[in-house]
Amino acid sequence: MTELTGGPKPTRWDRHLGGAESAYSRTFEGLIERGEDIDGEARLADVLAPRAARILDAGAGMGRVATALVRRGHDVTAVEKDSHLVARSRELFPEVAVVEADLLALTAPLLEAAGRPAEYDVIVLVGNVLVYLAEDTEVAALSALADLLAPGGRILAGFHPRNGPPHSHAYPVEDFRRDAEAAGLQIDQLFGSYDLHPPTEDYVVAVLAAASPR
């Protein structure tokens, strides 16, 4: 795919997995239909958030996490670039406010123009969004999200650092920590699951916050 001049680089998701019949869509719609537990990320985000928090779900997919958080009483903004997933989110979960945008283009003015808050108490960045970004854009994406944090706000990130889903890339914890620091963030807590198991090499759940002033 040719990069559009002046626009965001196509992500790994754009190049390999986007579209009306993506495996992602089929998988999660099947889980939802069977009544499977798909709320692990939302439960942890709810713990991190104050009551009636402003929460941004970055790379929201079909909106399953955003919906679970809306139902817990939060003011949630879902941001998703894939137009098919945006349409499915609006169809399946009409209670969720969805903004169709690339994370690299996400700014406070863009969100305000869509009638959404300009800053957030919690930003959710789960579901392997980080390992599907375009090459060498991790710092830019993390920086864009860091700029949207309210004072005391936190980012909940989750991804496979190795052996991830198809077409994702390896993203060792050391690289993630370096990129977070370059984006003005620090890792406050690191786990191996959304149930807060100890860190592992196979999955990363991280809680980030704005770095302390030096």
Image: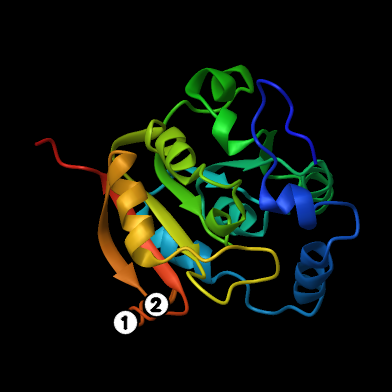
Q: Is residue 50 visible?
A: no
Residue at the farthest right position: 21
Q: At 82% across and 74% down in the image, what residue appears?
A: 30
Q: Is residue 115 above or below residue 119?
A: above
Give the number of callouts: 2
* Contact flag, marks 2 and 1 (Cβ < 8 Å): yes
Query: What element does badge 2 sit on?
Result: loop
Q: Is residue 37 above or below residue 28?
A: below
Q: Quadrant of residue 152?
A: top left
Relative horizontal placement of residue 105, taking residue 27 as reference (left or right): left
Query: Type of residue at label 1?
Result: Pro
Residue that badge 1 annotates: 198
Q: Is residue 171 above or below residue 107?
A: below
Q: Residues within 10 Å of mark 1 (few under 14, many from 20)?
A: few
Find residue 88 and report its horizontal and vertical position in percent: 83, 50
Find residue 5 and report its horizontal and vertical position in percent: 70, 22
Q: How is the image coloured?
A: rainbow
Find residue 202 and report its horizontal and vertical position in percent: 47, 79
Query: What element does badge 1 sit on?
Result: loop
Q: Is residue 162 above or below residue 213?
A: below
Residue that badge 2 annotates: 192
Give the quadrant of the C terminus. Answer: top left
Q: Quadrant of residue 110?
A: top right
Residue nearest the viewer, comparing 114 with 193: 193
Q: At 52% across and 70% down in the image, what residue appears?
A: 160
> Marks 2/1: CA distance?
5 Å
